[in-house]
Amino acid sequence: MIKFIVKSSINLFVCFFILSIPINNRELFNHINDRTGPVTKQLYVKINREVRHIFKKSTNFGKKLFNNSVPIGKLDDPTLNKTSASDIETMENIQVTDSIREEFSGLIREGIESDIYTPEEKARLREKIRKNKKGHH
């Protein structure tokens, strides 16, 4: 570990020394920066935009995923397990519209494309989507 720190410090010092060499009254770093600066700025903007997009997408996915979840400790809560006959009747009368079905399928597809499922789980989800499309269209 100490060897790594010493080696890194020496490398940093050598790079700093080389980039500080004056050429035409300006340091080498400034000459390099003049050529690479615009590209570096564009690259930074694109990477920043992509990271924000991925973060927003994963945040939305996480919110959708956990909106209807129940914490493990609440699964044994008797108040959550009491369902009246009128509640059951109401649940049975809910009609699943195409927009609801499509939103749910989209959520599953996003999950399949991510790394949160094992290959076996992804295969089962794909099969469910395929059966859902056959059964309702």
Image (cartoon, rainbow, N blue to C red):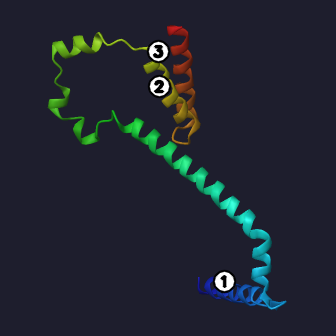
In this picture, residue 55 sits left or right of residue 7: left
**Mark 3 highlights which residue?**
98
x and y, in percent, of residue 55 in the image: 51, 49
In terms of depth relative to the viewer, which is nearer, 88 or 20?
20
Q: Nearer the viewer, mark 2 or mark 1?
A: 2
Considering the numbered disc 2 on the image, is that residue within a helix, a strand or a loop?
helix
Question: Which residue lies at the image location 59% right of the left edge and 86% below the top edge?
Answer: 2
- Determine whether 128 is above or below 72 in the image: above
- Determine whether 14 is above or below 75 in the image: below
Q: Disc 2 or 3, which lies upstream in sequence?
A: 3
Q: Which of marks 1 and 3 is in front?
A: 3
x and y, in percent, of residue 75 in the image: 24, 35
User: In the rendered image, which quarter contains the N terminus?
Assistant: bottom right
Disc 2 from disc 3: Cα separation: 8 Å
Q: What residue type is labelled 3?
A: Asp
Q: Residue 8 carries which label?
A: 1
Residue at the outermost right position: 24
Considering the numbered disc 3 on the image, is that residue within a helix, a strand or a loop?
helix
User: In the rendered image, which quarter contains the C terminus?
Assistant: top right
Q: What residue type is labelled 1?
A: Ser
Give the crowd class for mark 1: few <14, some 14-19, many >=20 residues within 10 Å: few
Q: Disc 2 or 1, which lies upstream in sequence?
A: 1
x and y, in percent, of residue 17 in the image: 74, 90
**Mark 2 highlights which residue?**
103
Disc 2 from disc 1: Cα separation: 51 Å
